[in-house]
Image: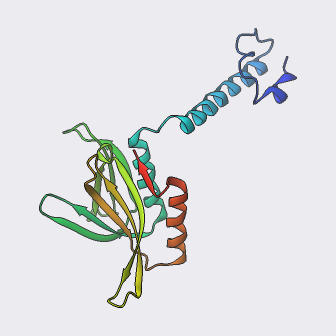
Amino acid sequence: PSTLFPTSHHHDHHHHHSALFSSEQEEAEATVEKEEQTEEEEEGEDDEVPQPKAKSVEDILRDLHTSALPFRIVVIGNGAILETTTTLTPTFKSSISPKSNEKLITIANSDQSFEFHVKVEQVSKVTFTETDKKDADGTILKTLRIIRMLNDVGKPICSLILADGGTEDGVEWFNNMRIRYGYEVQL
């Protein structure tokens, strides 16, 4: 009976689907309910099941991208280190590398003079750390807010240092990231 739909909306998803539908409207309502149920179930699963690591690193990178804050990006290669300061905008895309079949997140500026590719499946841990830079007398010159991405043996893949000059917005954003992900994310 359709009168049950509003009250049983969130509690009782299972009894309506097998019933014979007396009208198209009921069928439509049940279909809507079925979709909602699937979403709710998926949301519920996210809490219990550890998320696949590609998704988590992707989430963190997407948050860096949408913040539009500038970062000093440090990429540690074999025998060379590249550092650049930029916002992670406007391009953010996910792809599979045709060569290695690895999942890539690509972040780039509008003319591709800056491109940053992260092999997300190689990131095993992400840390959010605050480090005070002090002078010889121990006076704090500035606080570095650093996001590090590490591989499965704890070697740094890249670091992103918040480079907004310590604005309130930047500090708040970094603290919110720590609240959302924790100081250390094991993937």
| Viewer-proximal residue among 187 and 105 | 187
Residue at the extreme top: 20
* Spot occupied by residue 105 in the image (x, y as percentages of width and height): 34, 49
Colour basis: rainbow
Q: Position of residue 167 (x, y in %)?
A: 50, 78
- Residue lying farthest to the bottom in this orientation: 137
Please identify the residue farthest to the left as the structure is shown.
79
Residue 108 in percent (x, y) is at 33, 59
- Please give left or right for residue 51 compared with residue 149 in the image: right
Q: Residue at x 43, y 80 (%)?
A: 165
Residue nearest the viewer, comparing 77 with 88:
77
User: Is residue 175 shown left or right of residue 83?
Assistant: right
Placement of the N terminus among the 4 image quadrants: top right
* Quadrant position of the C terminus in the picture: top left
Quarter of image, res 41? top right
Q: Residue at x 36, y 91 (%)?
A: 137
Name the residue: 55% across, 58% down: 179
Q: Nearer the viewer, residue 97 or 81?
A: 81
Residue shown at 59%/36% (left/top)?
43
Q: In this picture, is 96 found above or below 106?
A: above
- Residue 82, located in which quarter of the rendered image? bottom left
Residue furthest out toward the front: 137
How many discs mark residues in the rendered view? 0
Judged left or right of residue 10, residue 73 is: left
Position above or below: 171 against 157: below
Residue nearer the viewer, 8 or 131? 131
